[in-house]
Image (cartoon, rainbow, N blue to C red):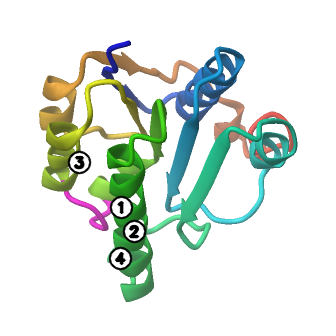
Amino acid sequence: MKGYVQVYTGNGKGKTTAALGLIVRACGAGLKVYLCQFIKGGICSELKTLKKRFCDVTIQQCGRGCFIKGKPSADDIKLAKKGLAKLRSAVLSGEYDLVIADEANCAISCGILTTAELLNLIDDKPSHVELIFTGRSAPAELIERADLVTEMKEVKHYFNKGIKARPGIES
């Protein structure tokens, strides 16, 4: 089976959720999955479920679990570079059918990864690997290289009324 490159971007809710849906579908078809989460850290509801019920999913978090505002710290950059090395290793290993780089677009926009690093990963990707990039602000070069791009557009969000992330819905 040929693998393609997908990008989920935009300011609307649902980018990671769409990628998680692909994980469920892939596991149902017997595919092996690698999920690398940039910026994120800590356990959220979806990771609890993946670890408990989806043994064919390898999860790697490479972040401190907080928003990066302004200049990223040395730790943020170090964690992202370690995560990128593990992501690259997973893509090239031949072990995984579906590889997800969650929040990779955000990692680029906040300066802890570069567009060139992700484009190089696409260049080196084995033909059978489906590679997914999620996060706001996908760079134009990544959008151009992808085979499928979906933009989540926020029309209305209750977060703007001060409602915090709720367990099982947003976290």
User: Which residue lies under the disc numbered 2?
Assistant: 80
Q: Nearer the viewer, mark 4 or mark 3?
A: 3
Q: Hey, which quadrant is residue 83 in on the image?
A: bottom left
Q: Amino acid at mark 3?
A: Leu
* SS at badge 2: helix
User: Which residue lies under the disc numbered 1?
Assistant: 84
Q: CA distance from mark 1 to mark 2?
A: 6 Å
Q: Earlier in the sequence, mark 1 or mark 4?
A: 4
Is 111 magenta? The answer is yes
Q: Position of residue 30 (x, y in %)?
A: 65, 21
Q: Nearer the viewer, mark 1 or mark 4?
A: 1
- Name which residue lies at 51% across and 51% down: 36
- Name which residue lies at 18% across and 50% down: 115
Q: Earlier in the sequence, mark 3 or mark 2?
A: 2
Q: Which residues are magenta?
A: 110-114
Of residues 30 and 106, the one nearer the viewer is: 30
Q: Position of residue 138 (x, y in %)?
A: 28, 38
Q: CA distance from mark 3 to mark 1?
A: 9 Å
State if disc 4 and disc 2 touch (CB < 8 Å).
yes
Label at residue 77: 4
- Name which residue lies at 19% across and 55% down: 117
Where the N terminus falls, by quadrant? top left
Mark 4 nearby-residue class (10 Å; few <14, some 14–19, many ≥20): some
Q: Amino acid at mark 4?
A: Ile
Residue at the extreme front: 94
* SS at badge 1: helix
User: Which residue lies under the disc numbered 3?
Assistant: 118
Q: Is residue 149 left or right of residue 162?
A: left
* For residue 48, above or below residue 53: below
Mark 3 nearby-residue class (10 Å; few <14, some 14–19, many ≥20): many
